[in-house]
Amino acid sequence: MHAPCSTAPDSVKTQSHKRRHRSPKRLYRGCQRAAAIRALTAARLYLTDAVKTMEQAAVACGSNRAYVAAMVILVHAENTTLIARVLSGCIGIVEAAQDAKRVAGLVHAYRQAYAADHLAFAKAIGPETLFDHVVVPAVA
C-alpha cells in the first residue's frame, strides 16, 4: 500500500487548491486542442503510408478513427486556415470536415488527375465557365 501524499492529518484541510499533477486527459497542449493534434498526426501517418489503416494510425496516436477520417478530409482540402481553427479549438474536427468535404474531394481529384484530365475537364465544363466561376472569384 502506498503512503498518502500529504502528512497532514485527515481532519485538517489544506489551503492550497493547486493540483499537484496534470490530468492525462487535459484538453489543450499549449494553445492547441490535444485531440486535434493527435488526429492530425494520425492522418499524416495514414496519408504517408506509414501505417496501413486509419484504425492503426488512430491507435498509434491515441486518437479514434472518426477524428482521423475527419482530419484526412481537412488535409485533402488543403485549407490551412481551417486546420488552424480546429487546432485552436474554434471549431470541432467533425464539423470542420463536414464543411470541407466537397472542397477536399475536388482538390484531391485535381491533384490525382493528369494534365490531359485537366484539359478534358476544362473542355467539358467550358473555359468560360471555368474562368467566370473559378478564376475570377478566386482573384477578386
Image (cartoon, rainbow, N blue to C red):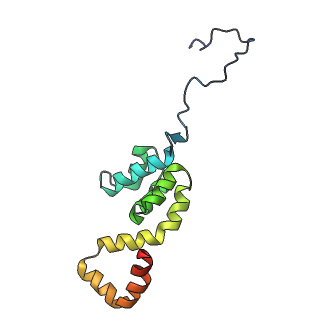
Q: Who's the residue at 33% across and 54% down the image?
A: 52
Quarter of the figure that contains the N terminus = top right
* Up-down relation of residue 56 to residue 80 (above or below): above
54 and 98: which one is in front? 98
Point out residue 59 in the picture as x, y percentages from the top left corner: 42, 46
Marks counted in the figure total 0
Q: In this view, does 88 lie to the left or right of 61?
A: right
Q: Who's the residue at 42% across and 59% down the image?
A: 80
Q: Is residue 103 left or right of residue 7?
A: left
Check the image and name the residue furthest to the front: 140
Residue 69 appears in the picture as rendered: no
Check the image and name the residue furthest to the right: 11
Quarter of the figure that contains the C terminus = bottom left
Point out residue 75 in the picture as x, y percentages from the top left corner: 40, 60
Q: Who's the residue at 42% across and 81% down the image?
A: 136
Dividing the picture into quadrants, the one containing residue 121 is bottom left
Point out residue 106 in the picture as x, y percentages from the top left corner: 40, 74
* Up-down relation of residue 129 to residue 100 (above or below): below
Q: Who's the residue at 40% across and 50% down the image?
A: 42
72 and 33: which one is in front? 33
86 and 102: which one is in front? 86
* Up-down relation of residue 64 to residue 21 (above or below): below
Q: Is residue 131 left or right of residue 49?
A: right
Dividing the picture into quadrants, the one containing residue 91 is bottom right
Residue 19 appears in the picture as rendered: yes
Point out residue 56 in the picture as x, y percentages from the top left corner: 39, 50
